[in-house]
Amino acid sequence: MKEIKQNKSLCRIKDVAKRLGIGESTAWRYVKKGELPQPYAKLSKCCTVWLESDIDQYIEDQALTNTDQNPFEDIEGVTR
């Protein structure tokens, strides 16, 4: 079983989606495509969680690589 380090917060899909400004189904689609971090653990059939630090790092990485572009926008300017 994975061990959570002290002071590590977990967040569910609704929290991930809200932080990214996208819908939950869109967030799941991005996870499936490998565009968002994989979940940290599946606590039950209906409860999947991410480490908040993984989401923070993803947002920071997107900000550094997409300074002039929406991270969820294709090069042609079409929002996914």
Image: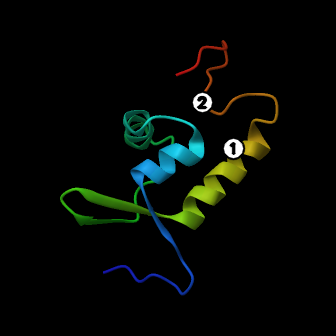
Measured as percent of width and height from the top left, residue 53 is found at: 59, 66
Residue 37 visible, this orientation: no
* Residue placed under numbered mark 1 in the picture: 62
Q: From the viewer's perspective, is residue 17 above or below residue 56? A: above
Query: Which of pointers 1 and 2 lies earlier in the amino acid sequence?
Result: 1
Residue at point 45%, 42% (across, down): 34
Q: Residue 79: give its label.
A: none
Screen quadrant of the N terminus: bottom left
Q: Amino acid at mark 2?
A: Phe
Q: CA distance from mark 1 to mark 2?
A: 10 Å
The spot of residue 17 in percent (x, y) is 49, 44
Q: Quarter-wise, where is residue 72 in the image?
A: top right
Q: How many neighbours does mark 2 have within 10 angstroms: few (below 14), some (14-19), or many (20 or more)?
A: some
Pick the front one: 13 or 74:
13
Q: Residue at x 81, y 36 (%)?
A: 67
Residue type of the residue flagged with mark 1: Gln
With respect to residue 42, does 9 lie above or below? below
Closer-to-camera residue (22/61): 22
Identified at 53% across, 45% down, the residue is 18
Colouring scheme applied when the structure was drawn? rainbow
Question: In the displayed image of the protein, which residue is found farthest to the bottom?
Answer: 6
Decide if residue 74 is on the left or right side of residue 51. right
Residue that badge 2 annotates? 72
Secondary structure at numbered mark 2: loop
Give the image location of residue 60, x and y in percent: 71, 52
Q: Local crowd at mark 1 within 10 Å, few (<14), some, or many (≥20)?
A: some
Above or below 55: residue 65: above
Q: Nearer the viewer, residue 3 or 52?
A: 52
User: Outermost residue, left direction?
Assistant: 45
Label 1: which secondary element: helix
